[in-house]
Amino acid sequence: MSDDCIFCKIIAGKIPCAKVYDQGGIFAFLDIAPVNKGHALVVSRTHYATLFDLPPDLGRELLAALKSVGRAVMQATGATGLNMGMNNFEVAGQLVHHAHFHLVPRHEGDGLRLWTQHAYESGEEMQKLAQAVRTAIG
Ligand code: AMP
Ligand code: ZN
């Protein structure tokens, strides 16, 4: 529990929320400012700041929760699609520093566009970058 974390306070029941899931190490609730109604946030009960702080052992339970909540949000809202997103670090739009996954139900023609895509200057530039990433992975 981080004292200045709003999601820790929600998990501890100190701040109200619209809870949808509470099993084992995973908790989920509706986002107060939804992209589409039913937009849910899936979080670890333990405070970790970003994706890179989440312990790999949490993976199985986390994936099960994401699938369960995602399926349920689609069913409850009548959505025919679902986006999952995660903002890590402020430059990527992370406002709450308790790692969380956004599940956004999608409807035909809802007009939401998540990404603006660009082109590489050349295939060579793309391959060089792939090599740099492989090197960083080690
Ligand atoms: P992010 O920009 O990825 O850090 O997203 C933080 C999300 O938390 C935003 O979509 C907010 O609308 C949401 N949020 C902030 N405070 C609350 C709250 N008290 N209850 C539910 N959602 C919240
Ligand atoms: Zn927290």
Image (cartoon, rainbow, N blue to C red):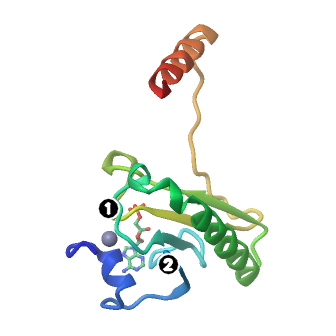
The mark nearer the N terminus, 2 or 1, is 2
Q: State the CA–CA distance, disc 2 to disc 1.
A: 16 Å
Horizontal and vertical percent position of residue 50: 38, 55
Disc 2 target residue: 27
What's the residue at 66%, 68% (across, down)? 64
Q: Which quarter of the figure has residue 67? A: bottom right
Q: Tell which residue pokes out farthest to the left in this image.
A: 3
Quarter for ligand 2?
bottom left
Q: Tell which residue pokes out farthest to the front in this image.
A: 57
Query: Looking at this view, is 134 or 35 the one in front?
Result: 134
Left or right for 73, reference 134? right
Query: Looking at this view, is 47 or 118 the one in front?
Result: 47
The mark found on residue 97 in the picture is: 1
Left or right for 58, reference 68? left
Image quarter hosting the N terminus? bottom left
Residue type at the position of mark 1: His
Tell me if residue 29 comes above or below residue 90 in the rendering. below
| Mark 1 Cβ and ligand 2 under 8 Å apart | yes
